[in-house]
Structure formats: C-alpha cells, structure tokens
Amino acid sequence: MPQSRDGSGSVYGRGNVWWVKVYVDGKPHRESSKSTKYGDAKRLRDKLLGQKLRGQISGGRPDRVTMGELLDDFLEYAKGNVRASTEYIYRKVTERNLRPFFDTLKPQKVTTETLHEYRRGRIRRPCRGHGQPRELAWFALPSGRGKNVHRRRSSSFHTSQCRGRRMSKQAF
C-alpha cells in the first residue's frame, strides 16, 4: 500500500492495516489505526496532532524516564529561576535525601504509598537545622496539604515542629 502524506503527519499502510506517524519534538510517534479503512487512520492522525498541540503526547520514550532524570531537570530549572541560596538548598536536599530513595524509580511507580514509605524512613532520621525535613513540604504540594507552609515569607520551618527527633503530625 502506498504511503500518503497530507498535513504534518503521515498515514501509511502495513499489510492491510493503516498506521499513522507524527513527529513530536523531532522524534517520530507511530500508532496503528487498527483499521483497514484509510479514513480511520486520518482521524487518528488528526487526533494525535491535536494531542501534540495540547502537549498530551511527547517525543521519545516517557516510559524510560527515571525520577533521577526528573530531579536533574528540577535542579537545572532551579539554577536559573530561583535565588542562588535557594538553589543551593534544593541541590543539597535533593542529593542527600531524595536521590538515594527515588533515583532509579520510574515516575509511574511513585504512588501515595511510595511517598508514605519515604516519609516514614525520612522521619526516622534525626532532624537538623530548621526541624522538619524541607522536601516533605514539596511532596505535600499536589495534595494541597502543604498550603500553610507556603504562605510564610520564609521557606524555613520552626524548630518546634521537630519534637524528640521526630516530625510532629501537625506539621502537615
């Protein structure tokens, strides 16, 4: 079957089934229409192009990304977008606490239970400096439970939140 191109994606046949190829970030994204009808493949191509414009699909292989790579991206972003002192703290906390636990995990495998497991292990370690481990507030952001933490002018925590080398439950 001949390959046909119209628009910025391509529709081509493999055997009796039509396939679609769309380039996202310079990398091909291929998907089968699972149909022998050319019109179904064109609709799939248009759907993929819409997802590409909305940022719902990405180039490359997102299933191969590790949390370590995302932490690297976060630190790279922080380098140019926050004060040097804040970037220094982010880097130290990430390297000392987050990377040993999350480095090789896939983002899809990070669940609420994984975060609770990290939290339990992190709380057992002695609190130093400002009391509560800073990175726990980062994990509280998605659930909205850390809102009070970010209303303060300073990112530091009061040492009364660390009682007997364990973080109090009121901290979250």
Image: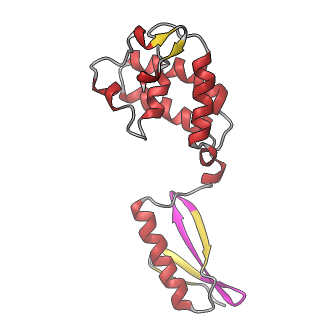
Residue 18 falls left or right of residue 48: right
At x 35%, y 25%, the residue is 149
User: In x, y percent, where is residue 120?
Assistant: 60, 26
Quarter of image, res 87: top left
User: In x, y percent, where is residue 97?
Assistant: 59, 22
User: In x, y percent, where is residue 7?
Assistant: 44, 78
Question: Over which residues does the magenta segment extend?
Answer: 12-27
Quarter of image, res 171: top left
User: In x, y percent, where is residue 64?
Assistant: 66, 49
Q: Quadrant of the C terminus?
A: top left
Q: Is residue 164 magenta?
A: no
Quarter of image, res 69: top right
Q: Is residue 5 above or below residue 161?
A: below
At x 45%, y 71%, the residue is 49
Q: Quadrant of the N terminus?
A: bottom right
At x 55%, y 33%, the residue is 71
Q: Is residue 44 above or below residue 56?
A: below
Q: Is residue 20 magenta?
A: yes
Q: Is residue 48 something one can see in this rendering? A: yes
Q: Is residue 162 above or below residue 39?
A: above
Residue 123 falls left or right of residue 137: right
Q: Main secondary structure of the magenta part?
A: strand
How many marks are shown on the rendered structure?
Answer: 0
> In this orientation, which residue lies closer to the viewer: 115 or 43?
115
> In this orientation, which residue lies closer to the viewer: 98 or 5?
98
Q: Is residue 8 something one can see in this rendering? A: no
Q: How is the image coloured?
A: secondary structure
At x 50%, y 57%, the residue is 25
